[in-house]
Each structure stands twice: as structure tokens, then as C-alpha cells.
Amino acid sequence: MSGGDERTVCIVLHDAAPSTRSACVRTLSAIRDVAGDAPVTILAVPRYHDETPNAEFEAWLGERVRHGDELALHGCTHRDDGTPQGWLDDLRRSRYTRGEGEFWSLSRSEALARIDVGIEWFAKNGWPLSGFVAPAWLLGPGAREALIERPFDYTATLRQLVHLPDQTPVTSQSVVYSTSNAWRRTSSLAWNALVDVVERSNPLLRLELHPRDADFVAVKSSWQKILERALRRRKPATVAEFMRRSRPADAGTVWMTTTRAD
Ligand SMILES: [Zn+2]
């Protein structure tokens, strides 16, 4: 992997939509408290839980782009509408992803149709588009096929960033919190402290935040500490910028897989 000796931290904010915007603003302001004007990759959802993007929300995103943030496409509705294939699949889809794994079971053509809604939305607003990140990072085989048919530079899973179309992976475990209940919050804190230590030798640290991650004091102070420490030794960059820098010179081989790449 190229990119020299430079160490990078990517700050990513998931699930930007009209209904999450005020929570996103709180999290972005908590990022700014620690990281100043560091650029953030904002994962925008075109039809989050079927809501329609309004002009005010689009103006806000446009403003973020003008200030150096990246917008990446994050699914279409963010909802998994498919029929579970047996009890294990049902458990995984309803409990692990809370029904948010929209791109897990789509066929290639279904995935293309949803991806194209997002591509059109970005084009209409004049926003540059490099990356697609599936909701809950769950990218099924049909969605993988669809992705390489559109001009994306990268996608991501929980444990990897993936160059497109060649699918060369860059391994980096995300620091990510679960805030849905007290038990999950507590175990998130311990888990992320461990990820932070393990990933210190990795040239890339990924801090993946959700809109409500500034609303719980212990969660906020955990990621702010990790970010503050990371910024002493790492330069912040958007995911698009990091992927441009780390693109292998010889990115010829396309491998297809039917399993998750993380
Ligand atoms: Zn999401």
C-alpha cells in the first residue's frame, strides 16, 4: 500500500438525513471541539426511512461540502425490506442490524435501482461523489456486483475500506459505538478502548460516529479522547482523500466474492 509513512485518521458521520440533522449538528460540533476544522466524511441517505430530502437539508449538506467535508452515499432508505431466509438470517437482520441492512439481500438490479436514486440526488445537487457505504456495512453479493458497475472509488465494511472497481482492501477496524441501550453503551466503551490500542500501529484509524454519539456523556468523552490522542500523531483526511492517496499503482485485478469482505 502506498501513502508513505503518513498516518491518517478518518472521521466519518453516518446517517445524515432531515430527521437526524439536529443530532448530526451536535455530533459535528463535538468533533469540532476536539478536531477544529478537520474534514469529516458525512454518509448521506437519500430517502432515510422513506423521508424526502428537503431544500434546507440539502443546503446544509452543500454548505458542509464547501467547507471541505466529503459526502458519501449511504444506501437509499437505510431499511432492510427483504424476507429473511430462515431463523438465523432473521435474527441477524432484526437484532444485529436492527432491520437496517438495506443492501444485504438485494439482487444486482434492485441494488442498482437504489444506488441510482442516490447518484441522481448527488448530481442534482452538484455534490462530488466518490464513495458508497452500505447501511450497517452489510453489502450482499448483488450489491457488490452493482457497485462495480457505477463509478465509485471506494466502499467500506466494518473492518475494511475497499478500492473500487478492483476491490483492493485496506484493513482498518472501525471505532464505532452502539448507543441504543445502556448495556450496549457500556460494552462499546470497553471494546473501543481495545480497538484504539490494537489499531495504534495501523497507518489508518477510522472513527465512525452516529448522529446520537454526542448525546451520551460517557460515549462522547470516550471518542473525543480517542480522537484527541489520534490527532497528536495523525493527520485528518476524508475517506475519499485517503483512498486517493492509498490507491495501489497496480489496481488491475477484479475479484468477485459472494461473502462479506469484512
Ligand atoms: Zn447507517
Image: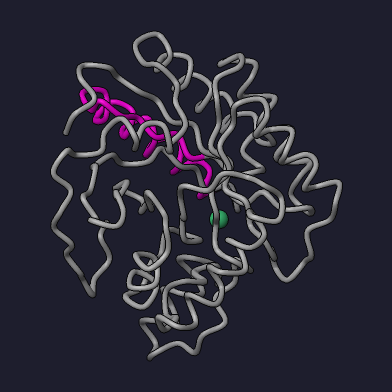
Residue at 77% across / 66% down in the picture? 51
Q: Is residue 62 left or right of residue 78?
A: right
Per the picture, the main secondary structure of the magenta-coloured stretch is helix
> 124 or 110: nearer the eye?
124
> 114 or 185: nearer the eye?
114
User: Where in the figure is residue 112, as x and y percent of width and height?
Assistant: 48, 75
Residue at 37% across / 39% down in the picture? 191
* Farthest top residue in view: 232
> 92 or 8: nearer the eye?
8
Q: Is residue 22 left or right of residue 139?
A: right
Q: Is residue 204 found inside the magenta-colored segment of the image?
A: yes
Quadrant in which the N terminus is drawn: top left
Figure check: 224 above or below 143 = above
Residue at 46% across / 55% down in the picture? 133
Q: Is residue 218 left or right of residue 90?
A: right
Q: Is residue 246 left or right of residue 56?
A: left
Question: What stretch of residues is rendered in magenta?
Answer: 182-208
Quadrant in which the C terminus is drawn: bottom left
> 23 or 66: nearer the eye?
66
Q: Is residue 105 found inside the magenta-colored segment of the image?
A: no
**Quadrant where ligand 1 appears:** bottom right
Figure check: 139 above or below 125 = below
Figure check: 32 above or below 21 = above
